[in-house]
Amino acid sequence: MENSNVNTEILNDLIEINNDRVAGYEKAIEELHVEDSDLKSLFVEMIRQSHRHKSALTGEVQVLGEKAETGTTTSGKIYRAWMDVKAIFTGHDRETVLNNCEFGEDAAQKAYKMALETEGLSANLKSLITEQKIELRASHDQIKALRDAVAK
């Protein structure tokens, strides 16, 4: 695959991952109880973060003269459906919501890692993706710390 095609494919995959992340946090907000309002503001910030990342990635796709993805990944849709089923059995407690969010953050980390390992990725895109991965890692660690605090 030529460099331009590789770059476009990777960028569009990451756009879909960020769309998944937005949808996942919107779903998580719906599941929160009143006493978990502290998580709502955190999740809203995570949504904003993904919109910023998506915007930067979309700009790069357009620079390549291609069309950016607007949907979510199939696996993301399946995961959100699984969250619905799981919630029926486990409830919408704080720990379950945070577990689900951490699972989504793990998936985002994996996607960004795979993107960075792709041969043919241009240097400027490697830099952008690395920066976003670092930001997402901090978000992951924040969610994990909150989850660990509840699990104790």
Image (cartoon, grey):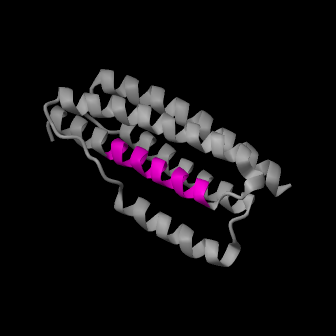
Write the residue at 35% across / 62% down. 74
Whether residue 20 is visible: yes
Q: Quadrant of residue 143?
A: top right
Q: Looking at the image, how many numbered discs can be counted on the residues?
A: 0
Whether residue 121 is visible: no
- Asked if residue 68 lies in the magenta stretch, the reply is no
List x then y, in percent, for residue 147.
73, 51
- Asked if residue 18 lies in the magenta stretch, the reply is yes
- Compared to residue 35, the image places residue 143 above or below, namely above
Farthest-out residue, right:
152
Magenta stretch, main secondary structure, is helix
Farthest-out residue, front:
34
Name the one closer to the observer, 86 or 92: 92
Q: Quadrant of the C terminus?
A: bottom right
Magenta highlight range: 13-30
Write the residue at 60% across / 44% down. 43
List x then y, in percent, for residue 115.
37, 40
Left or right, 102 with respect to 114, comes to right
Left or right, 99 with respect to 65, comes to right
List x then y, in percent, for residue 106.
55, 49
Q: Quadrant of the N terminus?
A: top left
Name the one closer to the observer, 113 or 15: 15
Write the residue at 49% across / 64% down. 80
Left or right, 72 with respect to 104, comes to left
Farthest-out residue, bottom:
89
- Compared to residue 127, the image places residue 28 above or below, namely below
Write the residue at 63% across / 77% down. 88
Q: Quadrant of residue 56?
A: top left
